[in-house]
Amino acid sequence: MRHILAPLALAAAITAAIAGCSQSGGTPEATATGGYRLDESKLPPVNRFAIGDINPEISACTDFAGHINSKWLAANPIPGD
């Protein structure tokens, strides 16, 4: 009898899970075009590339790490022990 009830219980659990996914509790709001609207003001700030971060005084051919990172390293020194 147990081997007959296991597939029925599994089918009932899958049905309940699928039905729960179709409810809109806590999900982003859908727009009229079918996509989702995202409130970007609630997202954390993202570090983005800026051309001003590159140091043109250091040649990229000779010291690429210095060319890219020297301004950041100067602004964020590693503290001593």
Image: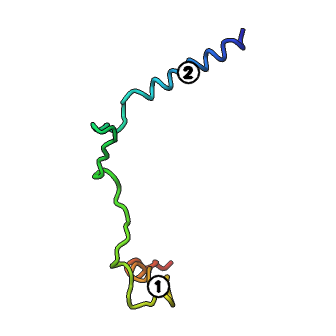
Look at label 2 and name its amino acid: Ala
* Along the viewing direction, whichever of 50 and 45 lies nearer the viewer: 50
Display colour scheme: rainbow
Lower sequence index among marks 2 and 1: 2
Q: Which image quarter is the N terminus in?
A: top right
Q: Residue at horizontal 38%, vertical 85%?
A: 55
Q: Element type at marker 2?
A: helix
Q: Which residue is mark 2?
A: 13
* Along the viewing direction, whichever of 78 and 20 lies nearer the viewer: 20
Look at label 1 and name its amino acid: Gly
Q: Residue at horizontal 45%, vertical 25%?
A: 20
2 in relation to 27, above or below = above
Position of 10 with respect to 60 (left or right) is right
* Outermost front residue: 33
Q: Residue at horizontal 47%, vertical 85%?
A: 66
Q: Quadrant of residue 71?
A: bottom left
61 in relation to 45, above or below = below
Q: Quadrant of residue 2?
A: top right
Q: Residue at horizontal 43%, vertical 90%?
A: 58
Task: Point out which mark residue 66 bears.
Answer: 1
Total labels: the figure holds: 2
Q: Distance between the Cα atoms at labels 2 and 1?
A: 58 Å
